[in-house]
Amino acid sequence: MKRPDAVTIIAVLVLSLVLAGAVLEHSFYPGEYRAEGTSTATGADFILESTLSTEYAVVAIDNGTEIPVSKLYIFIDPDYVPYCTSASGADSYITQFEKELQRRGFDNFQRTDAEELLALMDEDPAVGEGILIPFGTLPDTVYTGNPSDEFTKWTAAGGTVYWMGGIPGAYSVSKGQDAVEVFSPETVFPFVEGASEEEAISDIPVNSMCTGLSMVTSSTRFALSPDYPGVKGMGMKASDGRCSVSVVKDGPGTFFVIAGIPGDLQRHDLSAIIAAGVTYQSEVLAIENGEFKGSMTGTLEYSGANVSVYALYGGYFPIYGKRIIG
């Protein structure tokens, strides 16, 4: 059986990115870093420490009524993602992503194979649980394109999904087989109606979330249509309104779609979103940024009941991050 073109392209590019070395991957950080925050009646006080001169940003994010993801499952299984069996590219890509998460202050994650994913789907998602589908395919143990599939039940029960490498629900794969295209995935996930299969470059920051978290992805391939009710854009926006990051509600569940072929830029932005505690309802309340060395204190003024405050060092080349409140 011939592998679908989109999946083949993803496989080749993931491998080439790993072999070439990721642009934003840093292997050695000689400094020592610390960040702490305290909520106040008018916002938050914070203290930052760094033995090296570094850019910094402290961002206050109002999450409305939603709870940020605090536990992440990463789906990867060489028996169900065919290109994992022919090269180490996919495994290496996930390893780099895990390092990026840790560098940004998020370490509560675990890899999940097809069997473990099915077991996870058998229960309703716990508060704060999310799943990453990194290469645009789901195993047929949880998804075949039917509304009764276990994966659709889990998302409908309130789970958060981070999706990279294609249009959500467009491909399913059986053990040891090539991925197959799902007919009309929009019948299962209506929000993919009108999703982009063409490449376009976004170059306009959607809002202060983009600059505050130093988001860099510019591709809009696989982006959700801005015309679908409830689709919100994050990151960068193209002239047609499509964004490098799309987020939409699926009932009580949430889908984050990271546009483009999985690469270092996609990994960069997704790790920022997860580590900072971004949700569908997230809005930036306040930002302070600049450059410092040694120790500094500061204050953010805002009003909100469910606020995350995130500190990031290094800007577009992150060296340290921490959610200091929330």
Image: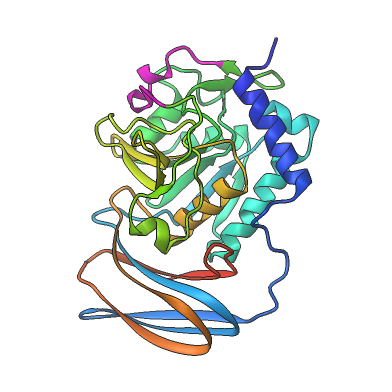
Q: Which residues are magenta?
A: 181-195
Q: Residue at x 67, y 58 (%)?
A: 25
Task: Say whether residue 131 is visible.
Answer: yes
Residue 163 locus on image (x, y percent): 49, 37
**Quarter of the figure with the C terminus:** bottom left
User: Magenta stretch containing residue 191, yes or no?
Assistant: yes
116 or 65: nearer the viewer: 65
Q: Residue at x 77, y 30 (%)?
A: 85
User: Is 28 on the left or on the right of 234, as rendered?
Assistant: right
- The question of residue 184 being in magenta is answered with yes
- For residue 179, what is the image quadrant? top right
Left or right of residue 320: residue 59: left
What is the quadrant of residue 325 in the picture?
bottom left
**Who's the residue at 37% across and 51% down the image?**
127
Up the image or down, 153 lies above or below 55; here it is: above
Where residue 35 sits: x, y (%)? Answer: 48, 79
Image position, residue 116 (x, y; %): 59, 37
Q: Residue at x 59, y 34 (%)?
A: 135
Q: In the displayed structure, does residue 229 sit left or right of residue 115?
A: left
* Closest to the observer, 297 or 197: 197
Is residue 309 shown above or below 94? below
Residue 98 as seen in the image, left or right of residue 211: right
Image spot of residue 190 (x, y percent): 33, 23
- Corner quadrant of residue 263: top right
